[in-house]
Structure formats: C-alpha cells, structure tokens
Amino acid sequence: MTESNQEKTPLAIHLCAPRGFCAGVDRAIQIVELALEKYGSPVYVRHEIVHNKFVVDGLKAKGAVFVEELEEIPAGHTDRPVIFSAHGVPKSVPEDAQSRKMFYLDATCPLVSKVHKEAEIHFRRDREILLIGHAGHPEVIGTMGQLPDGTVSLIETEDDARAFTPKTDRPLAYITQTTLSVDDTAGIVAVLQDRFPQIVAPHKEDICYATTNRQEAVKHVAPKVDAMIVVGAPNSSNSQRLREVAERAGCRTAVLIQRASDIDWHDFEGITSLGLTAGASAPETLVEEIIAAFATGSTSTSRRCVLPKKRFPSTCRGSCAR
Ligand code: SF4
C-alpha cells in the first residue's frame, strides 16, 4: 500500500448506545438550574453536583458556588439555597443544615435514595449490613452515613469478601454502590453467597440501569474496535468502570479522557476503528467534540508530528496539525 493510500484510510467511529447523561444526572443539573432561575445567584452546591468539570464550570458561570462542606458557606449566606449532589449525603449533612437554619434542596438520585432505604430496612430488621463499593466515593460515604457509625461493613474486593468476619450473630444482608462493574460485583456476591448462603440480597439489583446498560454497550463494541475512548472524569466511578470493561472485553487501547484536548494522539496512531462512549455524567457535547477532533484528521499520517516520540515536549497534545 502506498503512503497516499494509507492517508485515505477512513476511521470508523462506533458510538456506543446508550452513553452519557443518565436521568439522575440530568435531574440533578436541572435542580441547580431551576434554583438559580427561581432564587438567583449565589446558589450553593455541596460537592460537585455530578462528576464532570465541564458541567460544574457551566453551572459556576451561571452563579452556582461549589463547596465541599456546609461550614464553607459564609455566615451571611445561610438563607441562600444549598443543594446536595446526585451522589447522596450522610444523614448528618441535612441535620447540620437544619441546625444552621439553612434552606437545602436534595438532588440525590432516586436510585441512590432507594439503596439508602434498603439500608434502613435491613437495620430495622436487625440485620448486619455489608456494602459492596469503593472506599471514599461520595455515594459510599452517603450510604454508610444513613446508619450509625460502625453499622455497615465495606467490601471492596473478592478478597475482602473472603476475609470478612461477621461482627454479630445477626442475619447478614448486602447492598451495593450503584455505579460498580456488573461483573466484579457478581464475583464478590458469589463469594459472599458461597460463604453465607442465607445472606439477604437486594430485591432488585442496586447497580443502576444506567451503569448496567452503558457497560453492556461497551462490551458489545469493544471487541470490534482498535481503540476505545470513554469520555468522563477520573473521579467518576461509572466512567472508570466503562474503561475497565472495554479493556477486559479485548480492546487493546482503552482510555478515559475529559476533553478533546486530553487526547494523546500517539495512542491512536494507525487505528482504523474507534469506539466512543461517555460516562453518565458526561454531556453529549463532549462526545461531539471528540468526533470533531478526529474528523479534522489529527490521526491521519499527513498530520502526524514529525518529531521523534522521545523529543515530544511533555505538554504536546499532537494538535498542531504539523
Ligand atoms: S449513574 Fe445511576 S445512580 Fe448515578 S445518577 Fe445516574 S441513574 Fe442515578
């Protein structure tokens, strides 16, 4: 094949469907926008309303102010609305807001609230509760915080499930974070059910539909493409899981990026097919931005940088159209 023929090789982009915004994220963003419309700025938001910088920056531009804790809200602004993020919050947070006489709006996704209710029901029925999830994730902090400290045991891996020792002789029950890998969670549940056959499972899967069907779409596309891009933030659990799913499904290059400017063009040299998806907190406009970046031909041989790889400056994003 001649060089000019190589240059004309088209890149096939396979869009995963569904991808991007889920209903819970859409709802949370609308709550902030409606609050801004109704009450004017500033409207305070505790924690990133959803894990996406583009979305957060857009809301900041409209007058939303993001804080990590309620105590960061200035004393003179306690009458301004404060919104809790889609990930949910420990019970102590609305209690704290009430004691400070704050006006709060709760944008917790109803599917996260469902898991909170399950935890409470297990607690009322005197069951010892295990939560399958990732330590430190805001949703996990929120779910564990529905019950008194020390009530819920966190299980992150199959090894944790093997090592778990019940603290009491009460019946066991498990719940899960909503944005986990379906396959990893099935492995952890299998270990628990093998060790504790009577453990009470959720009536209906706690991993939400948006997480499940986005992972299914990636499993379908990943084996057919040379590379997969997941649009999402590094702190977005469901986006991270999509990247892992693509890798395990046999895609040799699977990367998570936030914007087109993050593309490392070396990763995509010579590819003829690309899979593209987005985490539940990434808007479609960012997917379109990635498509536009590839459409400008940045991966074609005619626009490949002539510098040897080792001489690339660390800041090079390969977008100089050299
Ligand atoms: S990913 Fe699932 S749980 Fe999280 S906001 Fe979306 S629908 Fe709700």
Image (spheres, rainbow, N blue to C red):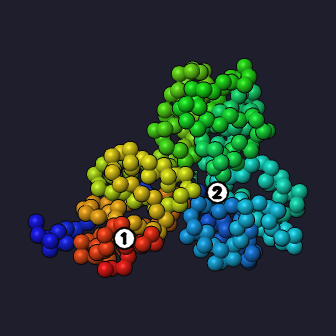
Q: Quadrant of residue 72?
A: bottom right
Which amino acid type is marked by label 1?
Answer: Arg
The image position of residue 159, as x and y in percent, is 55, 31
User: How dense is the environment of label 2, judged by Cα within 10 Å: few (below 14), some, or many (20 and up)?
Assistant: many
Comes first in the chain, label 1 or label 2: 2
Q: Secondary structure at mark 1?
A: helix
Query: Dots 1 and 2: beta carbons under 8 Å?
Result: no
Is residue 1 shown above or below 96?
below
Q: Residue at x 33, y 79 (%)?
A: 321
Residue type, numbered disc 2: Ala
Could you say which disc has been placed on residue 311 in the image?
1
- Residue 170's disc number: none
Q: Which quadrant holds residue 24?
A: bottom right
Residue 61 located left or right of residue 149:
left
Asked if the residue at label 1 sits under 8 Å from ligand 1, the reply is no
Q: Position of residue 42 (x, y in %)?
A: 75, 75
Q: Which quadrant: the C terminus? A: bottom left
How far apart marks 1 and 2 lie (CA) works out to 44 Å
Number of numbered discs on residues: 2
Give the percent coordinates (x, y) of residue 185.
Answer: 51, 37
Q: Is residue 282 left or right of residue 219?
A: right
Judging by the rendered image, the residue that carries numbered circle 2 is: 86
Q: Quadrant of the N terminus?
A: bottom left
